[in-house]
Image (cartoon, grey):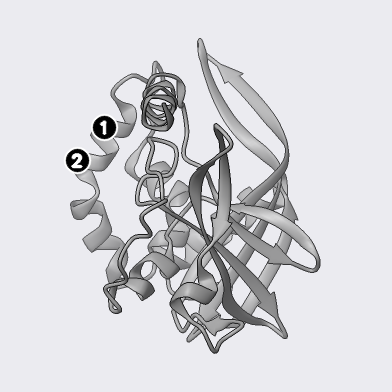
Amino acid sequence: MKKLILFFLIISFKVFATEQIPDILVYNGKKYEWRSYNTGRDYIKQFNFKVPEDAIETTANNGFYTFTYTIENDSLFLTDITILILKAGNLNSRSVFKDFFKDKKKIIMEFSKIQTFPYGKQIEIKKSNWTDIYNKKYLVFEFKDGRIEKKYDLNYKNFFKLKKKLFVKFKQTKEYSKAKTVEIENLENFNEFRPDKISMDEYLEIKIFGLIKTLKE
């Protein structure tokens, strides 16, 4: 019976799931959704941990694990790893952090990357029968070896202004010419269904945080 219930739960997730369960960032006591690059997933690959027998994988948690990160004293730590399990006929979660790292409470994530965290109310901007969706506010961090080098907490208008400033600076670098060539296919895919096509410069401005290494203006 348990296997039958599990089967239908998994099928239900595959049919009705519309988005991934987000990882979590804890910053100043608040939780934010972490939906971009997952440094913890890459980190645990080196240990070849065996997936727990009670772990359930669905379209909502592809890869079994959900990661929680915490910023403490301007450093980024991995502080929890959870799995989905079946408990009393219902989906629940269970921490496996101590199963993997018995003698540790947290692990520094020594990576260098610009990471953004949209939060707050979503804002819809409509133009020519097309709707772009943004969040009201954005956290932006520049991490270097797991330490915060620079950070912003911006409303969406100032978030776009920051992107524009950084893009103007990026245009003066050699990487700008390379990006215009590398991103041709991505721009075409981005524009495929948009009634108003955007230019390469507009596209690179949207992607600017993935093209640069520092937030210094």
Q: Alpha-carbon neighbours of circle 1 within 10 Å: few (<14), some, or many (≥20)?
A: few
7 shown above or below 31? above
Residue 97's disc is none
Contact? badges 1 and 2 (CB < 8 Å): yes
Residue drawn at the location 46% of the way across and 39% of the way down:
20
Image quadrant for the N terminus? top left
Q: Does the rendering let one see residue 136?
A: yes
Q: Amino acid at mark 1?
A: Asn
Marks 1 and 2, Cα distance to the nearest angstrom? 6 Å
Front position in the image: 65 or 216: 65
Q: Position of residue 54 (x, y in %)?
A: 41, 51
As drawn, the residue found furthest toward the top would be 129
Among the 4 quarters of the image, the one containing residue 170: bottom left
As helix, strand or loop, the secondary structure at mark 2 comes to helix
Front position in the image: 47 or 5: 5
Read off the residue under disc 2: 185
Residue drawn at the location 32% of the way across and 71% of the way down:
49
Q: Position of residue 65 (x, y in %)?
A: 44, 56
